[in-house]
Amino acid sequence: MIVTGEASGDLHGSNLVKAMRQKCSDLSFAGMGGEELEAAGVEILFDAKKVSVVGVSEVVSHLADIFAAQRILRRFLAEKRPDLLIIIDLPDFNLMLAKAAKKLGIPVFYYICPQVWAWRSGRVKTIAERTDRVGVILPFEEKYLKDRGVEAEYVGHPLLDSVHADLSRAEFLRKHSLTHKEGDDDGCRLIGLLPGSRSKEIAFLLPTFLQAAERLQKNSKQRLIFLLPLASTISEEELNAQGLREYQQKLDLHVIRGDRYNLMAACDAVVAASGTVTLELALLNTPMVVTYRLAPLTYFLGTLLIDIKYFSLVNLIAEREVVPELLQKEVCPENIADQLQGLLEDESKMQDMLNGLAGVRNLMGGPGASVKAADLALKLL
């Protein structure tokens, strides 16, 4: 049985199923997931979309679905007695299911476990009790969990299998008509604005990013082209509501649909919201400034629960400040523009960051996370 919730878990789970079947062709799978797992041949017992919710109010409104999913999956465990339960992320839901599996003597493999090193560290004990093996995707997680009694092994990050650019900078510029003539990018610098893929992130960060871009252009003697990738979850209307159209009249500012990794790889520097995107940028060798801003009350409550030295994944993996981090009130046009300008004008500063990003890539190892995770899972059968 395989159980996951969000779209990313559905994708990673499908790749894991494919890798396991390549090594052992007579396996059959059932569980909770979405379109990716179903396409991989998994019998879907419950649609993951019904339980993939965040926030207290959303959870409360979906309690009936959550209880129904637990009931259906537990019945399957009890009646069919699968040889292995694979759980992916979705910690509160999955750890309850893991408890039921352990009582039935069914081994449990946890792939992509919660970030217990950042918050709610008490869950480590629960993970140790209810799982037989954990496949982690950040290199420092293995030691953290092993030191606390969890059978953990680093399998690599799934991004290592999927993040790559297939166009050169010049090809990208020509494809999106960003040059005056073929190959003409002399003196041109590309700056990426990546405020996130959620509406709240756009509202919190995009206006500040646009103000920083204007300030950066005023202080630069070079031609700057600003690029903003349009996430599938965001509409241009939402961007315009935060001032995009106004700034497109002042700046050489382009919204690009798709081509995300080619855009990121082509940039000389990027300002980005903290998240998985920082790892994507590191893998593409793109210098960055990382920002994190929440509503004041949310941030205050977070400080009571979270205890980490850095908030960007790049710095957490490196265990030092490879990229600058701007937090809450530090996220202002002046700071962002100054940090980007420093990268663009100081070659030694830029090279230091590129060396640091190379170190992060070395720590992350090579591709093949799904294959390595499949090996761990099959050992439990």
Image (tube, rainbow, N blue to C red):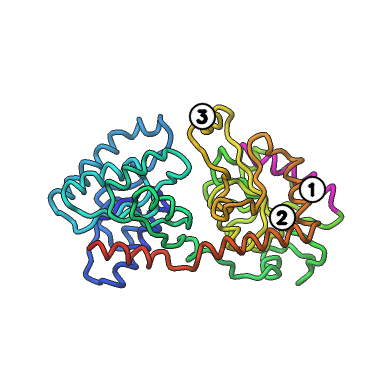
Do labels 3 and 2 touch, CB within 8 Å?
Answer: no
Q: Position of residue 183 (x, y in %)?
A: 76, 71
Q: Position of residue 199 (x, y in %)?
A: 55, 40
Amino acid found under the numbered disc labelled 2: Ile
> What residue is shown with label 1?
216
Report whether 76 appears left or right of 122: left
Do labels 1 and 2 touch, CB within 8 Å?
Answer: yes
What range of the chain is rendered magenta?
A: 204-220
Mark 2 or mark 3, which is nearer the start of the sequence?
A: 2
Query: Distance between the Cα atoms at labels 3 and 2?
Result: 33 Å
> What residue is shown with label 2?
191
Q: Residue at x 29, y 72 (%)?
A: 23
Label 2 element class: strand
Mark 3 or mark 1, which is nearer the start of the sequence?
A: 1
Quadrant of the frame with the N terminus: bottom left
Q: Is residue 235 magenta?
A: no
> In this orientation, which residue lies closer to the viewer: 188 or 281?
281
Q: Quadrant of residue 152?
A: bottom left
Q: Position of residue 209 (x, y in %)?
A: 69, 43
Can you tell which of label 1 and label 3 is closer to the viewer? 3
Give the numbered dot on residue 301: 3
Q: Residue furthest top?
A: 297
Can you tell which of label 3 and label 2 is closer to the viewer? 3
Name the dominant secondary structure of the magenta segment.
helix
